[in-house]
Image (cartoon, rainbow, N blue to C red):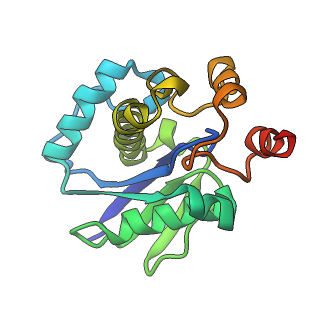
Amino acid sequence: MEIIAGVDEVGRGPLAGPVVTAAVILDASRPIEGIKDSKKLTAHRREVLAQLIEERAIAFAYGRAEVEEIDALNILQATLLAMKRAVEGLSVPPTRVLVDGNQTPVLSCSVEAIVKGDDKVLSISAASILAKVKRDTEMSTVIHDLYPQYGFAAHKGYGTRQHLDALTKYGATPIHRRSFAPVRLYLQLK
């Protein structure tokens, strides 16, 4: 029997914080209405769906790559590492993994990249929802509480005007990605 896991990531573009991935094996006998690409859902709807996915999925797991890994490896390799960690964290090993995008991590099972997979494959959409809720929650609470002057609750680490202004005013924190151009430029100007 084929056991398919969908995998997606959140957080490749931000200037700060981890990249977070999720792997999900959905249960066809316990469907969840409304699953689609996390970017097409409101924050509230994502949270509701994330809870349902965690309750009804056969298995799900999270992976992540920290800022230090992103800076050392580059964002693509760190993302693939986080995806591998999510798949390896599943309580039920998949026989096939479908990954959103055009690159795949090296896994011990069959793996396929699907461009715009979060729009096309339900389990990838479910993974996008879990990863987005997980990362946004961390950035809005833990990280925001550590560095409230940066406004992480609002922008989640993305390069908004508010974030760039805070970076100029307060400097880089340990959770800023030094390999990313705006942070690197700021550090060169200091």
Q: Nearer the viewer, residue 48 or 164?
A: 164
Specify the farthest residue to the right: 189
- Residue at x 55%, y 69% (from the top left corner): 105
| Rendered position, 184 above or below 63 | above
Rendered image quadrant of residue 4: bottom left
Quadrant of image for the N terminus = bottom left
Q: Nearer the viewer, residue 186 or 19?
A: 186
| Rendered position, 137 above or below 127 | above
Q: Nearer the viewer, residue 142 or 46?
A: 142
Is 159 on the left or on the right of 107, as rendered?
right
Quadrant of image for the C terminus = top right
- Residue at x 63%, y 18% (from the top left corner): 162
| Rendered position, 174 above or below 94 | above
Is 88 on the left or on the right of 20, as rendered?
left
- Residue at x 85%, y 45% (from the top left corner): 188
- Residue at x 30%, y 21% (from the top left corner): 45
x then y, percent, for residue 72 = 67, 67
Rendered image quadrant of residue 46: top left
Q: Nearer the viewer, residue 102 or 10?
A: 10
